[in-house]
Amino acid sequence: MEYRELGRTGLKVSEIGLGCEGFVQPEAAAEMFKLALAAGVNCMDLYSPNPQLHQNVAKAIAGCRADFVLQAHLCTIWQNGQYKATRNLAEVKLAFETMLTNLQTDYVDIGMIHYVDTPQLWQQIVENGILDYAKELKQQGKIRHIGLSSHNPEAALAAVESGEVEVLMFSVNPCYDLLPADEDVETLWADESYAKPLLNLEPKREQLYETCQRLGVGITVMKAFGGGDLLTEDSPAGQALTVCQCLQYALDRPAVAAVMAGSRSAAELAACLHYAEAPAAERDYTAAFASFPKISWQGHCMYCGHCAPCPQGIDVATVTKFLNLAKAQGEIPETVREHYAALSATAKDCVGCGVCAARCPFAVDAPANMQAALALFGY
């Protein structure tokens, strides 16, 4: 298992984390946790307020709580045996304290403000006391870092750019990433959203990922498999992808630290954990993307690394990522400048041989990107 820095939090999380869908039954939870912990998984998302689930998690991580990163949600309550999202501050407070009791812990690592899918709702969170409550919990040590979950890049950008959010949970997969921002999450899996040909990463989503990278906001991924739709022939892409391909795609996006895999059985979890030992060819999604019947990624750098190795030693994908981060900002952020300066070879070393472009499965003009980076950074 590989581990990544979770933005500026100082936490290191396993690339594969746990969703909470399959952990309600005690026996299944114990089996799946045993499998996950043995594979090196050290993080989990708990969006559900189900008290039985929380108690199952408490038992499973009792011996490793200090080393296990819990991402748990504010603004969810358990009412009449059902999950419900709430913005009522009194309900939010009671539900959080109940969750700590059921988890048998006095803190969660990431307090995730739940399901903020419109800019207006983010403003409501700011104004109605919920953000202040999250900050109060952080001061008390009951949450270590403030997070937010969203499916809408416009809402997520507003939260990230506020500087209040350290971790973003976002829906990331190669179909959702093509769609424009919408306040109705149902559009992400509606057939009509994919009825006409789609071209490349939607600009707001690209801006979101690059802004998170620039500001040090770590991304934890939900919906990497589109609720399972991307793994079937009924996929919005027009053909099935594999578990490893979906995971690799999400982990290749800027700022992504971990995918919270929503497994409902030990077999599904094992398929996700296989990613850690899968060869590069099994993870590679580029050939599949190039053959999608309804989706085109031509001309868009996916940071997939197929352009390597460069005869001059340039990490072409990384230089391109820094170029795009700077272009998205309209200037060169200091952190981007520092990371660019630390490269062993930069755009000035490009001789325009075109080897990288010939290897690119998406027909990206990589030498032109190197020239643009040279003009921007000066070396």
Image (spheres, rainbow, N blue to C red):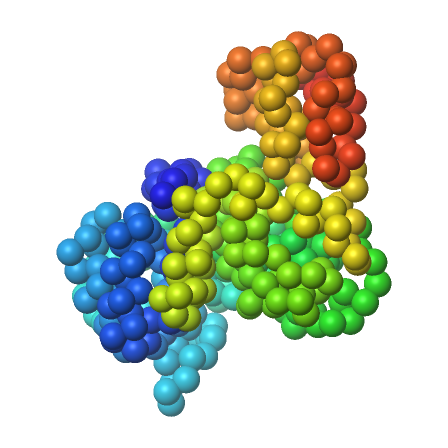
x, y percent for residue 20: 38, 67
The part of the image, by quadrant, that contains residue 277 is top left
Image quarter where the C terminus lies is top right
In screen coordinates, is 195 left or right of 85?
right
Tell me the residue at 84%/63% (across/down).
196
Is 309 drawn above or below residue 35 in the view shown? above
Tell me the residue at 62%/35% (across/down).
303
Count every numbered label the image shows and give the total.
0
The part of the image, by quadrant, that contains residue 362 is top right
> Going by the picture, which residue comes out furthest to the right?
196
x, y percent for residue 290: 74, 46
Is residue 27 visible in the rendered image? The answer is yes
In screen coordinates, is 158 left or right of 299?
left
Is 74 drawn above or below residue 198 in the view shown? below
The part of the image, by quadrant, that contains residue 129 is bottom left
Is residue 258 visible in the rendered image? The answer is no
x, y percent for residue 242: 57, 56
In screen coordinates, is 22 left or right of 185?
left
Tell which of 184 and 194 is nearer to you: 194
Tell me the residue at 77%/65% (across/down).
194
x, y percent for residue 137: 31, 57
Tell which of 119 and 254 is nearer to you: 254
Image quarter where the N terminus lies is top left
Tell me the residue at 39%/59% (across/down).
270
Is 103 drawn above or below residue 77 in the view shown? above
> Going by the picture, which residue comes out furthest to the left?
63
Tell which of 329 and 274 is nearer to you: 274
Tell which of 104 and 92 is nearer to you: 104
